[in-house]
Image (cartoon, grey):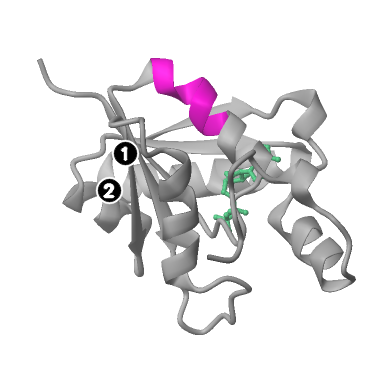
Amino acid sequence: MQQRIAIFPGSFDPYTIGHHSIVERALPLFDKIIIAVGVNSLKKSFMTERRRVEAIRELFVDEPRIEVISYSGLTVDAAREHGAQFLLRGVRMIQDFEYEKNLAEVNRELSGLETVLLYTLPEYGHISSSIVRELLSFGRDASSMLPPGYHINE
Ligand code: ADP
């Protein structure tokens, strides 16, 4: 039987407890999830591409069903390259919903890929990579918003 493979694309700059919860809740739905760190060479990132990938990999050393990659270019191309038939995304609030709806339509038209959306758990609804970056830039502790064992720096 064909494996059900999902790709979970994002900037993950950094990967938060909200992202992690989406991956953990989606694991029973798929045989494999590819966490795909999107690289935009025009945008300055907070963490390097290498660190963004490695920090997530460290969380899943004992989970063979998770693969972590980085990609530049279109998500649908990365999905095809890695044999994913589904796109996984998370929704926090109405703004996410509208954005994700458009993205899902474009990706389906481009490649036939179906998007699977999971709603955030209520306790993670306010968490975003940008809030974590903001807290850290003012020297505050943001560890409660990051998965246990996730390290921004090596
Ligand atoms: P992008 O730049 O592609 O939006 P992000 O890293 O910000 O990348 O997010 C990747 C995915 O994770 C998106 O679908 C986003 O809606 C979802 N996401 C982000 N934060 C949360 C959260 N706290 N709870 C659930 N989903 C989230």
Q: Is mark 2 on a helix, strand or loop?
A: helix
Front-lying residue, 36 or 119: 36
Is residue 24 found inside the magenta-colored segment of the image?
Answer: yes
In the rendering, at what x and y percent does residue 124 appear? 76, 34
Q: Nearer the viewer, residue 109 or 34?
A: 34
Residue at the disc numbered 2: 79
Q: Residue at x 56, y 56 (%)?
A: 12
Gap in angstroms between the C-alphas marked 1 and 2: 9 Å
Q: In this view, does 120 lie above or below 132?
A: above
**Is 73 or 114 nearer to us in this picture?**
73
Label 1 vs 2, first from the N-terminus: 2
Q: Indicate which label's residue lies in the foreground, 1 or 2.
A: 2
| Number of the label disc, if any, that sits on residue 113 | 1
Q: Where is residue 43 in the image (x, y as percent from the top left)?
A: 56, 80
Seen in the picture, residue 136 relative to 108 is either above or below; the reply is below
The magenta region covers: 22-28
